Amino acid sequence: MKVKIKPGWDVEVIRTLREKFPDVAIMADANSAYRLEDINLLKQLDEFDLMMIEQPLASDDIIDHARLQKELNTPICLDESIHSLEDARKAVELGSTEIINIKIGRVGGLTEAKKIHDYCSQNHIPVWCGGMLESGIGRAHNIALTTLSNFTLPGDTAGSNRYWEKDVILPEVVAENGHIEVPKSVGIGYEVDREAIEAFTVEKKHYR
Ligand SMILES: [Mg+2]
């Protein structure tokens, strides 16, 4: 269960969820809503046995994340802070993060995503794959990426129908009880539905 938190919508919300769902894995995503001076508030979240607190502080602030992580028992997961393998290395070496959310688009593609995965694997930092409202084509890449061995935490990738009335791949991605079956075919594992893309196209330009 993933919950977005922000000042005024945090400790009591998580407490209520934890009381209602004592055994469910819960992660809280702050999207940079806090500052280091909120440390005592964030420490209150330790009692709820969260899987992680994602990106509590600003995206360019890996130093304060390191100070915060030293004070928290709950693992910090960096999301918006990580744009490259270099960012990952610095954050891990500083102790700013114990988990990394890898988004293919955010880190600049599959090659960098795999490099971050491999680095994290060698440094015992588990990773998971966040979603960015991809169409089926991006979704297919997420599914393929998350078959790598260090993607040990549940990802954000949902079925096509979670976001789209009609997706642009065939077959659509189907999630059942939170699981997606990895396709066995080559390439991205799905067919691009060119008719659907044509139907959704609003403008075309040719460049020579
Ligand atoms: Mg996030």
Image: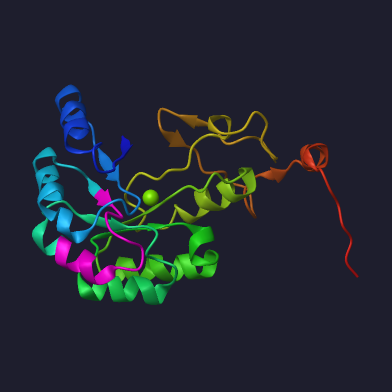
Residue occupying the point 41% across, 73% down: 85
Up/down of 99 relative to 46, above or below: below
Q: Quadrant of the N terminus?
A: top left
Relative placement, left or right, of 102 versus 95 is: right
Q: Quadrant of the C terminus?
A: bottom right
How far across and how far down the image is residue 22, in percent? 15, 28
Q: Nearer the viewer, residue 10 or 147?
A: 10
How far across and how far down the image is residue 23, in percent? 18, 30
How far across and how far down the image is residue 148, in percent? 42, 57
**Residue found at the very far top of the displayed protein:** 20
Residue occupying the point 68% across, 31% down: 166
- Looking at the rendering, which quadrant does residue 200 occupy? top right
Magenta highlight on residue 60: yes
Residue 8 visible in the current orientation? yes
Residue occupying the point 35% across, 70% down: 88
- The type of colouring in the image is rainbow
Relative placement, left or right, of 6 versus 205 is: left
- Looking at the rendering, which quadrant does residue 20 occupy? top left
Relative placement, left or right, of 174 versus 186 is: left
How far across and how far down the image is residue 77, in percent? 28, 56
Residue 23 visible in the current orientation? no
Relative placement, left or right, of 89 versus 48 is: right
Up/down of 75 relative to 84, above or below: above
Q: Which segment did they paint magenta?
A: 53-68
Residue occupying the point 55% across, 65% down: 109
Up/down of 40 relative to 162, above or below: below
Magenta highlight on residue 88: no
